[in-house]
Image: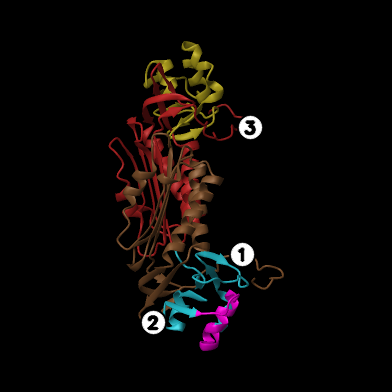
Chain colours: A yellow, B cyan, C brown, D red
Amino acid sequence: MRVKVLFFGRLKDIVGRAEDSVDLADGARIEQLFAHYGARHPELARFRASLVASRNQEFAPWSTPLHAGDEVAFLPPVSGG
Amino acid sequence: MRVKVLFFGRLKDIVGRAEDSVDLADGARIEQLFAHYGARHPELARFRASLVASRNQEFAPWSTPLHAGDEVAFLPPVSGG
Amino acid sequence: MTPPGDDIFRLVVEPIDAAALVRHVRAGEDGAVVTFDGCVRNQSHGRRTLYLDYEAYEPMALAKIRDIAAEMHAKFPIHRVAIVHRLGRLQIGDTSIFIAVSAPHRPAAFDACRFAIDTLKRTVPIWKKEYFEDGAIWADGELPPAPAEAPAAKPAS
Amino acid sequence: MTPPGDDIFRLVVEPIDAAALVRHVRAGEDGAVVTFDGCVRNQSHGRRTLYLDYEAYEPMALAKIRDIAAEMHAKFPIHRVAIVHRLGRLQIGDTSIFIAVSAPHRPAAFDACRFAIDTLKRTVPIWKKEYFEDGAIWADGELPPAPAEAPAAKPAS
């Protein structure tokens, strides 16, 4: 199944792109999607404890199962205002 | 000694004037000045507990002694803002 | 944090230019400006208000507003303050009081702005007369805290 | 107290027109408008700031801002809300966030406005990059509270 992935702030700088699209095994969870990028970008993996994920624009736990067409984003600490 | 007296808000309506000037015995206090007007305007006397006085633009207790040239004001509850 | 000369305190009869006051209080060091805009409501205790008249004991009101600003600077790490009260006849929706406070960080700006309006409503000699279709009344207000009486006042010398 | 359609939520790249937002939120029933204006400071932790870039996860940021307003209406007796955040490059003194809250009485307006900015800074996906003379950094921020993990997640079916 294919999901859309977004990176923001310093995560975008680390990964080198703001948006990606990947094929995952059915039943994959957000943590597996993150591991996919963490393996390619060790610096990203180190941010695991200081970021949150969203699925379809709602904050989502790492254990959230994904479905085809989902939009997942990895969000560093926010600094708006 | 002569002092200037100011009335504001409903006190001005009761007394019928905003400003007055009176001669008082030396050593008179604010409470004696108020009694002077209370005797002429019984409705004013009834407001004694719900007003404060000022002397030379500072809140002042009723027992404050007055001096020639002082400016005394009688101030109902404030409602600015 | 600022010479008091940079603050603005005014009693005015013309409409209050809020934008100009906000521009005045903020500078490069400030991350926050909090404002309070008190405006004339269309009703009071369920009666339809037509308009208001505000009057002040002007020199004392300005002195008390200055006292409030001095206390704001002493209590909160703020930068500049503007406090402007309008007097005379005000229509529904008109701004009667505008307070702007700038600060490097927002908690002080919020706390100081709220302190200013809460204190002003208790201590500044300004009065509001409310006009309704069937009459007018002086608004209920708050009695400023008077200094304590001298416990045993001696006769004046 | 108001249909949510009367509130304003925007992410903009042009300067924020604060006066228009204040005019929008206030109506005859309101006695108070409290605003928060967050502006770009000239320094950060003692380093001189040149300018900032703000970016957002825009649809989610707008949804989270709407959530904040819904919570404001649920918690406080307020009338209308305007929350506008500017994105892109901002210079020193530019307003990055403007919040206006109207209410019949001032305590709700103060409480709701402060709740709005405090919550926005914790939960809305917007990020700030600070540019200094010797480099740029993503500002330290706050980690939004993520929903709890399922205690024993079952394999996805």
x then y, percent, for residue B57:
50, 64
Decide which of D101, C76 is in the foreground and name it: C76
From the viewer's perspective, is the residue at label 3 or at label 1 nearer? 1
Q: Amino acid at mark 2?
A: Gly
Q: Chain of mark 2?
A: C
x then y, percent, for residue A51:
51, 26
**Vertical placement of residue C79 versus D112, above or below:** above
From the viewer's perspective, is the residue at label 3 or at label 2 nearer? 2
Q: Is residue D55 magenta?
A: no
Q: Are marks 3 and 2 in contact (CB under 8 Å)?
A: no
- Main SS, magenta region, reads helix
Quarter of the image for the N terminus of chain D: give it: bottom left
Q: Earlier in the sequence, mark 1 or mark 2?
A: 2
From the viewer's perspective, is the residue at label 1 or at label 2 nearer? 1
**C-alpha distance separating marks 3 and 1:** 63 Å
Q: Which residue bears the numbered disc 3?
A: D151
Q: Residue at x 37, y 22 (%)?
A: A18
**Vertical placement of residue B78 versus D133, above or below:** below
Q: Is residue B36 magenta?
A: yes
Q: Which residue bears the numbered disc 1?
A: C147
**C-alpha distance separating marks 1 and 2:** 35 Å
**Vertical placement of residue C148 versus D94, above or below:** below
Q: Amino acid at mark 3?
A: Pro
Specify start and end residues of the magenta stretch as a single range.
B23-44
- Mark 2, other Cα within 10 Å: few <14 / some 14–19 / many ≥20: few
3 and 2 marks on the same chain: no
- Mark 1, other Cα within 10 Å: few <14 / some 14–19 / many ≥20: some
Q: Which residue bears the numbered disc 2?
A: C135
x then y, percent, for residue C65:
47, 57
Q: Are marks 3 and 1 in contact (CB under 8 Å)?
A: no
Q: Using residue D146 as the reference point, say whether residue D100 is left or right of it.
A: left
